[in-house]
Image (cartoon, rainbow, N blue to C red):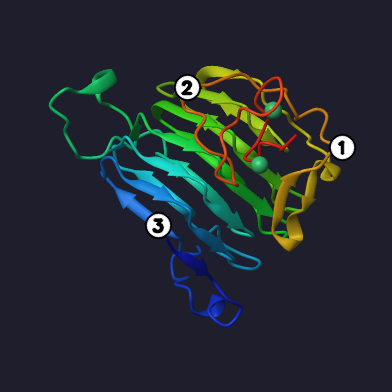
């Protein structure tokens, strides 16, 4: 379990020579069956110029990654599977799933909270040339974001994703990506979440568009309290299952 803040004191020391913001949290190339669970990432961005890497990024044909129950606060980008339309990596799997020509293979992203109230927030979850990732029960909210692009973006023709039961500001699809995308709530009101700036991401009683609005999914996992998504008549949207 990691707790990885990038502080104001450290931010000016980030490598900028490429015109970017060359830092991130966990960056894995060609990894298989990694589990990234229960970590906290905060403040990974550069102020004013350059886009930081993700808090959690698996690419170069990584496979079977499980990313769950992490809290990512005020980072430019949250979780990424794959990178770019030509990211096919170098790792060869004997069974060549889906033909193998992918940036990321299988994997699950669930019950993560990604929250930002800074202007430098860009994207919460990025799915790029990835198949068949399962992205369920994530809370991805942002109140600001001068350059805000998306809470959850899936992209490019070889991508096929399962995206369900997420509580977000916006879902975007680009460049021919496809998927099973339903039971997500966009434009979730601020009143739906208790006190995110204080680190409380529980649903409020006002979250009627999220409570019991999900669908039962096999890979639902455990919510931010470690409880299953079984309270009430149906699973709640996002990373919290509200106790009755
Ligand atoms: Ca419920
Ligand atoms: Ca709960």
Residue on which disc 2 sits: 218
Horizontal arrangement in the rendering, residue 94 relative to residue 71 (left or right) = left
- Residue located 48% across and 34% down the image: 127
Q: Position of residue 58 (x, y in %)?
A: 37, 45
Residue holding disc 3: 26
Left or right: 212 as drawn, with respect to 46: right
Marks 3 and 1, Cα distance to the nearest angstrom?
Answer: 35 Å
List the residue tagged with mark 1: 206
State which tag comes first along the sequence, 1 or 2: 1
Q: Residue 191: x percent and y percent? A: 86, 44
Per the model, the C-alpha gap separating discs 2 and 3 is 27 Å
Q: Is label 3 or label 1 in front?
A: 1
Is there a contact, CB below 8 Å, between mark 3 and mark 1?
Answer: no
For residue 10, say whether it is visible. yes
Q: Residue at x 57, y 83 (%)?
A: 9
**SS for callout 3:** strand
Q: Residue at x 71, y 25 (%)?
A: 232
Task: Please state the total of marks drawn on the protein image.
Answer: 3
């Amino acid at each position: 379990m990691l707790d990885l803040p990038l502080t104001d004191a450290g931010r000016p020391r980030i490598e900028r020579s490429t015109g970017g913001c060359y830092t991130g949290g966990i960056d894995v190339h060609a990894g298989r069956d990694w589990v990234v669970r229960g970590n906290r990432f905060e403040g990974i961005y550069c102020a004013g110029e350059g886009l930081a890497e993700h808090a959690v990024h698996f690419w170069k044909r990584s496979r079977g990654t499980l990313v769950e129950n992490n809290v990512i606060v005020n980072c430019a980008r949250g979780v990424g599977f794959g990178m770019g339309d030509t990211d096919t990596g170098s790792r060869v799997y004997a069974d060549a799933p889906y033909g193998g020509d992918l940036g990321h293979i299988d994997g699950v992203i669930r019950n993560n909270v990604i929250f930002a109230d800074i202007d430098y927030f860009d994207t919460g979850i990025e799915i790029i040339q990835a198949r068949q990732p399962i992205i369920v029960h994530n809370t991805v909210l942002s109140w600001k974001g001068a350059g805000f692009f998306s809470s959850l973006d899936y992209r490019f023709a070889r991508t096929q994703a399962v995206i369900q039961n997420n509580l977000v500001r916006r879902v975007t699809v680009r460049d021919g990506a496809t998927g099973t995308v339903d039971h997500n709530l966009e434009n979730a009101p601020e009143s739906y979440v208790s006190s995110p700036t204080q680190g409380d991401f529980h649903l409020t009683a006002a979250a009627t568009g999220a409570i019991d609005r999900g669908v039962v999914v096999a890979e639902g996992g455990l919510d931010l309290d470690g409880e299953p998504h079984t309270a009430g008549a149906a699973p709640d949207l996002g990373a919290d299952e509200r106790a009755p």
